[in-house]
Amino acid sequence: MDIVLVLYLLIGFMIVAAVIAIEAKDLLSSVVSVSAAGAGLSIVFLLLGAPDLAITQVVVEVLSLVILIRATVTRKDTTYDSRPNTFAVAGGLVFCALLCAVCYYAFAHMVPFGDPKMTMGMPYLMNTFERTGAANAVMGTILDFRAYDTLGEATVIFASIIGAYVLLRHVGRRSAADQESASPTRKSSATEWRTP
C-alpha cells in the first residue's frame, strides 16, 4: 500500500474524529474522539519518520485523555439543543477542502520514502564530531543540533505530568465541619483551671 494513500486515510480519519468531537452531544464521546484524532496524528508522525514526536504525542495524548475523562465524569453536564449555524458549517467544509488541497499538494511534492537514503541524516552523522565535539552522534544531534526541539518536548511532557498531578491529587480537602471538629477551640488559661 502506498504511504501517501495511508497518510490521506489518516488525515481523513482525524478530520472525521474532529467533526464527531464537535458535533457529539455527550462530552465523554467528544473526549474519546479528540483522543482518537491525537492517536492518528501520532501514527502520522511515525510514518513520516519522526518517532520522537510520535512518542511525545502519545504521552501527551494519554495524559490529556486521563485528565479530560476525570473532568468529564465529575462534571454535571447540561446541554441544550440549538439549530446548526449554516455559516459555521459552510466555513468548516471550506476549511476542510482547503486543508485537503494543501495536503495533496504537499504530499505530491515530497521526496519518495527511502530514495535517496539519508538525505537529512547524513550531514548530521558526518559533521557531529567536528561541530559539537560529541563522540556519540545521537546525543550530539539531540542536545546540540536539535536542542530547542528536545527542550520543547521535555517541557511539554513535564507540563502534562504536572497538570495531571494537580488535577488527580486528592489531598487535604476537607469540609468546614471536618475542619471544625479537627481543630477544637482552646480555652484560655484562666477558665481552664477554674473549678466549679
Image: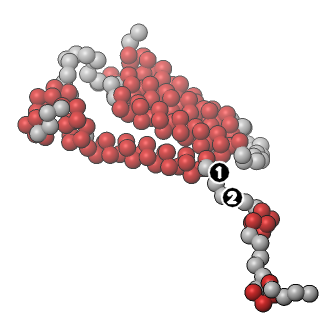
- Within the image, what quadrant is residue 121 found in? top left
Which part of the image, by quadrant, shows the N terminus? Answer: top left
Residue 40 relative to residue 114: left or right:
right
- Within the image, what quadrant is residue 179 found in? bottom right
Q: Which residue lies furthest to the bottom in this view?
A: 190
- The three-letter code of the residue at mark 2 reads Arg
Instruction: Determine whether the residue tagged by mark 1 lies in a helix, strand or loop.
Output: loop
> Is label 1 in contact with label 2 (beta carbons under 8 Å)?
yes
Residue position for label 2:
173
- Within the image, what quadrant is residue 82 found in? top right
Instruction: Determine whether the residue tagged by mark 2 lies in a helix, strand or loop.
Output: loop
Of 101 and 4, the residue lying toward us: 4
Residue 140 relative to residue 22: left or right:
left
Of 139 and 85, the residue lying toward us: 139
Q: Which residue occupies 39% across, 25% down?
A: 46
Q: Which residue occupies 55% across, 48% down?
A: 165
Total numbered badges shown on the rendered structure:
2
Q: Which residue occupies 47% across, 35% down?
A: 59
- The three-letter code of the residue at mark 1 reads His
Residue position for label 1:
170
What separation in Å lies between label 1 and label 2 (alpha carbons)? 7 Å
Q: Which residue occupies 20% across, 22% down?
A: 118
Counting from the top left corner in percent of width and height, residue 35 is at: 56, 33
Is 180 located above or below residue 136 in the figure?
A: below
Of 193 and 168, the residue lying toward us: 193
